[in-house]
Amino acid sequence: MKGGSAPFALTSYEEIKKRGRAIAKVTVARYMPPWLPEKTAHSFVGDNSLTKQEIEIISEWCESGMVKPASGIGPLISPKSLVEWKLGQPDLVLEMNSTFEMPAESEDIYRHFVIPSGMKIDRYIKGFDFKPNNKTSFIMRS
């Protein structure tokens, strides 16, 4: 999605085919989608890792020439799922004073940003969301 957290969109066949070989490589290596916990007998809420079968489907599609799906297949991502705030309307929006640009073809970069909230008392945060390529950087729920 344009303006999303990824350095490129994957919402159409053309966008995906352009990066098909790279997608197959990083999914086989389990580099993408990112999921750091090791597979154990226990499951985690929110586990977005791909199944072995899903990885095989991607690899086979790539090896077979990345043929375009038959017509009638809808978009891979529903436009309705692309909401402005994934956690709902925020209680507080904080903005960064400067920008940080991460190159599209880089390794993961771990950074800590201090963003003054102006709050005078300590608050518990139930969740937060962040929006790259946008002045709004983090939301917090109290």
Image: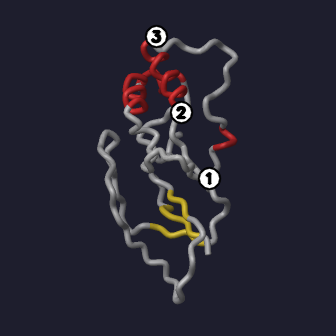
Q: Which mark is residue 64?
A: 3
Quadrant in the rendering for residue 6: top left
The secondary element bearing badge 2 is classed as loop
Residue situated in front as seen by the camera: 15 or 63:
63
Amino acid type at circle 3 is: Ser
Instruction: Answer with mark 3 or mark 1, whichever residue precedes in sequence.
Output: 3
Tag 1 residue = 84
The secondary element bearing badge 1 is classed as loop
What is the distance, in whole Å, between disc 3 and disc 1 at their CAs? 37 Å
**Rendered location of residue 9, percent (x, y):** 48, 35
- Give me the residue at 49% from left, 16% from top: 61
**Rendered location of residue 114, percent (x, y):** 38, 72
- Give me the residue at 42% from left, 73% from top: 115
Instruction: Answer with mark 1 or mark 2, whichever residue precedes in sequence.
Output: 2
- Give me the residue at 43% from left, 23% from top: 20
The secondary element bearing badge 3 is classed as loop
**Rendered location of residue 111, percent (x, y):** 33, 61
